[in-house]
Amino acid sequence: MLNVYMLLKYSFEYSGMNVQRGKLVSGGRLQLPVEMRRALSLGDGDTVLLEMVDGEIHVRPLRDAVSRIQARLRDYIPVGVSLSDELIADRRAEAAGE
């Protein structure tokens, strides 16, 4: 007799889903399996974003979200322009005017 676990594992693996079991530990902390932490290059103390989507929790590294935003904004910034340099110059000009 085929057990339910094997059937579910087969379904998840071949449908392209990567589903693994985590655990809530003391203080409401979420413990992620080592395979997932390695796949996402997550280490102790790394910041992640948690998002509720249709009753599910989606977890992703903050650095990935920042990279996506930077990639989207890149099209709107002229080549050779440094936004951080412009911001620093603006702050210095404001400080000089005070």
Image (cartoon, rainbow, N blue to C red):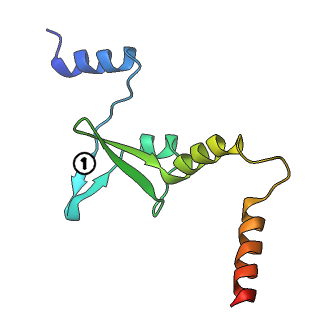
Q: Is residue 85 left or right of residue 66?
A: right
Residue sitting nearer the eye, 69 or 16 = 69
Measured as percent of width and height from the top left, residue 90 is found at 73, 73
**Residue type at tag 1:** Lys
**What residue sits 16% from the left and 16% below the top?**
3
Measured as percent of width and height from the top left, residue 97 is found at 73, 87
Q: Is residue 54 left or right of residue 45?
A: left
Residue sitting nearer the eye, 6 or 70 = 70
Question: Relative to 24, does residue 72 appear above or below in the rendering?
Answer: above
In the orientation shown, which residue stands out farthest toward the front? 97
Quadrant assignment, res 73: top right
Q: Which quadrant is home to the C terminus?
A: bottom right
From the image, tell me which residue sits under label 1.
23
In the orientation shown, which residue stands out farthest toward the bottom? 98
Mark 1 Cα within 10 Å, few/some/many (few <14, many 20+)?
A: few
**What residue sits 32% from the left and 35% below the top?**
20
Question: Relative to 25, does residue 88 appear above or below in the rendering?
Answer: below
Quadrant assignment, res 94: bottom right
**What residue sits 22% from the left and 57% below the top?**
25
- Mark 1: secondary structure: strand
Q: Exactly how many numbered labels are in the figure?
A: 1
Question: Relative to 26, does residue 51 appear above or below in the rendering?
Answer: above
Measured as percent of width and height from the top left, residue 38 is found at 50, 44
Measured as percent of width and height from the top left, residue 43 is found at 49, 56
Question: Relative to 59, does residue 6 appear above or below in the rendering?
Answer: above
**What residue sits 70% from the left and 77% below the top?**
91
Q: Which quadrant is home to the N terminus?
A: top left
Quadrant assignment, res 56: top left
